[in-house]
Amino acid sequence: MKNEQLPAIEVKIKQPPVLFGKTQALIAQLAEQLGAPLIAYWNGPRGSVCHSDVVAMYHVLQRLGEHEVIYLFLKSSGGSGQVSLRLVNLLRQHCRRLVALVPLECASAATMVALGADQILMGPTAYLTAVDTSLNHSLSPVDRDNDRVGVSLDELQRVIRLWRDQQGEVPENAYKSLFQYVHPLVIGAVDRAESLSIMLCRELLAYHVADEAKAEAIAGALNGKYPSHNYPILLDEAVKIGLAAERMPAEVAALLLQLNALYSEMGQKATTDFDEQRAHSNEIANIWEASGAQVYYQQDKDWFYRSEERRWITLNDNSGWRRIERIGSRLRRGELHVA
């Protein structure tokens, strides 16, 4: 009896939903409630504030045009602080007054974006964070998955301080032992990045804070006051350090949470596992949206686990920005090419 070969099972690759119609309806409702246009910026768990965001936002702003006031919905865990300055600079070219809407997480580089707004409206579940810099350098230590880890100046300073406290009156050179784990060039780069972070905060606050001493105090607090980079700065604390933060109207907060729920559905994990070593990711990471236009970054790539290196590598990477625009009664979809 001949062995019959079983037919290959075709695995359907998961696709994330794109809810343009629903999100547009909420954005229109929010703009009517606020009395001014709204632009939304949302990051998923694997999204971040990055340089290509600037071009994506510019595409959305071209549709939005110039206005007296623009409201900016922010939900992000952070990214590049230098990009924050570029984003605020671009937004400021399209409005005289910028108001940040923070219903949930607005961390690190996203907090920097909020610093560039004339006013920050925070919902009941909102928080900002410290902005002290954590640097992922090409010479950084590696984790258990053989990936480079971020190193912050605050962490290094605390290690040195603890070392000296425990060594007594004549402490041994702590850096001699530390260099076995952290390359000296990484320590130098982190120290430089910390100075850059303070400078960025001052530049962002200068858009609306004329008092240089006040801007310096806010920048110093955000970069050195808190014991953790992810320390949640709630509304009362934000006001205490000098930020122009106020409580968000309840009806606006409710609508923004509905919008976040739709974006979370779009940004849900969309990984297709073929076997233990092969998978495909098709996840939406970043979203920009205003009336009539939505631009989002979608991961679209194969993953292969290289066991000898203990890490995942990517193959067939077709990730990129996609856009949806309303042209009259029609929707136009396509790719947004960002070099």
Image (tube, rainbow, N blue to C red):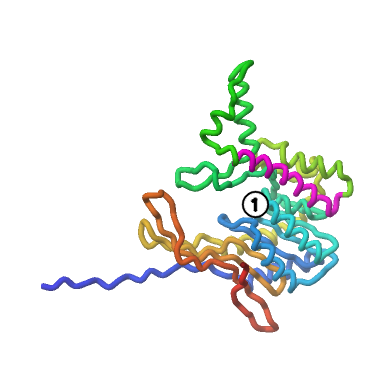
Which residue is rendered at x = 72% and y = 41% of the image? 223
In which quarter of the view is residue 224 placed? top right
Residue at label 1?
78
Any magenta on residue 200?
yes
Q: Residue furthest bottom?
A: 329
The residue nearer to you, when weighing 57 against 33, is 57
Q: Amino acid at mark 1?
A: Gly
Q: Residue furthest top?
A: 169
Q: Nearer the viewer, residue 255 or 44?
A: 44
Residue occupying the point 62% across, 58% down: 43
Is 324 magenta? The answer is no
* Residue 337: percent from left, percent from top: 61, 71
* 334 to 14, vertically: above or below: below
Q: Quadrant of the C terminus?
A: bottom right
Q: Measured from the top left, where is residue 302 in percent x and y? A: 44, 63
In terms of image quadrants, where is residue 263? bottom right
From the viewer's perspective, is residue 49 above or below residue 153? below
Q: Which residues are magenta?
A: 186-209
Q: Residue at x 45, y 57 (%)?
A: 313
Residue at x 66% of width, y 76% of height:
325
139 lies left or right of 40:
left
